[in-house]
């Protein structure tokens, strides 16, 4: 028995060493390759994560930039609106101030003068003078029922006068562009009882602010009225501001006045 035990302890260590695992050189190379692959994969994952964070940061930064630009645009728009509103308010205030004192010239009434020629009463109801004014007139013979339809403005030979003071009046003789012969016909009682003598025209003027305006007028009379003039219903303009082109078209150069800006 002792011999068996002795032989066991003598043989056991070599057998143990024979069955112990000892990796070869090729196996070690494969292991190291796998470790490097895992390390590369981890590095790639880390880089992908960093790239994702970088993209997110860029998107957030871009969004902040866009919001900043929108806020700046909104601020500029508000500033622009404020400036526009301020200018509009200033313009409205200026217009209101000018309107309260400017000249308002119109033909207040018409009467017959010497030789049955109509006399126009040109009146300025404004508180400041008109720098100048001009009048153009036509004389018409119209059936009584069509007076309003005849009250339309035409192209007149304008006659100018110098300044008309504020709250003042000036009488001028009507010098018609058309219808001069009708005055004599009316004076000789050659109109039918149903026919009327109609005076239609416009008065244009410039106020102290060098703005140009026009006002239309129409008056009529017949034998039954005894020579007094009435004012028909009409749609003629009243104190309408004229553009530079309108002013030139109406007045031309016959007035001998500055036709510059309004």
Image (cartoon, helix red, strand yellow):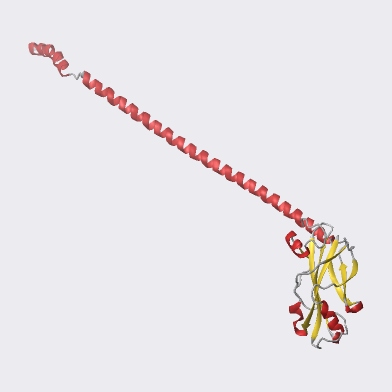
**Rendered position, 38 above or below 217:** above
At 64% from the left and 49% from the top, the residue drawn is: 77
Q: Which quadrant of the structure image shows residue 151?
A: bottom right
Residue 217 shows in the view: no
**Rendered position, 79 above or below 203:** above
Q: Which quadrant of the structure image shows residue 212?
A: bottom right
**Toward the viewer: 71 or 230?**
230
Picture coordinates of residue 26, whole percent (x, y): 21, 20
**Toward the viewer: 204 or 12?**
204
Q: Which quadrant of the structure image shows residue 50?
A: top left
State the quadrant of the N terminus. Answer: top left
State the quadrant of the C terminus. Answer: bottom right
- In screen coordinates, is 160 left or right of 246? right
- In screen coordinates, is 242 left or right of 6? right
Picture coordinates of residue 255, whole percent (x, y): 82, 62
**Toward the viewer: 90 or 66?**
90
Q: How many marks?
A: 0
**Rendered position, 179 above or below 73:** below
Picture coordinates of residue 196, whole percent (x, y): 81, 83
């Amino acid at each position: 028995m002792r011999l068996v035990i002795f032989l066991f302890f003598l043989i056991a260590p070599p057998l143990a060493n024979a069955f112990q695992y000892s990796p070869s050189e090729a196996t070690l190379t494969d292991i190291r390759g796998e470790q490097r692959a895992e390390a590369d994969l981890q590095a790639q994952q880390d880089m992908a994560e960093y790239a994702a964070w970088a993209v997110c940061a860029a998107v957030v930064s871009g969004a902040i930039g866009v919001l900043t630009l929108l806020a700046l645009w909104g601020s500029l728009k508000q500033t622009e609106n404020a400036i526009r509103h301020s200018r509009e308010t200033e313009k409205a205030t200026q217009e209101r101030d000018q309107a309260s004192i400017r000249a308002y010239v119109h033909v207040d009434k018409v009467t017959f003068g010497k030789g049955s020629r109509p006399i126009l009463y040109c009146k300025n109801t404004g508180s400041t003078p008109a720098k100048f004014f001009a009048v153009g007139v036509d004389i018409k013979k119209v059936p009584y029922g069509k007076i309003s339809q005849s009250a339309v403005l035409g192209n007149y030979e304008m006659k100018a006068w110098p300044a008309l003071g504020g709250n003042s009046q000036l009488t001028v003789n009507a010098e018609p562009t058309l219808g001069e012969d009708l005055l004599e016909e009316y004076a000789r009682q050659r109109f039918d009882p149903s026919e009327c003598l109609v005076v239609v025209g416009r008065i244009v003027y410039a106020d102290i602010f060098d703005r140009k305006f026009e006002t239309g007028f129409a008056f009529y009379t017949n034998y039954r009225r005894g020579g007094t003039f009435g004012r028909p219903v009409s749609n003629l303009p009243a104190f309408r501001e004229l553009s530079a082109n309108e002013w030139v078209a109406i007045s031309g150069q016959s007035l001998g006045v500055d036709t510059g800006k309004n």
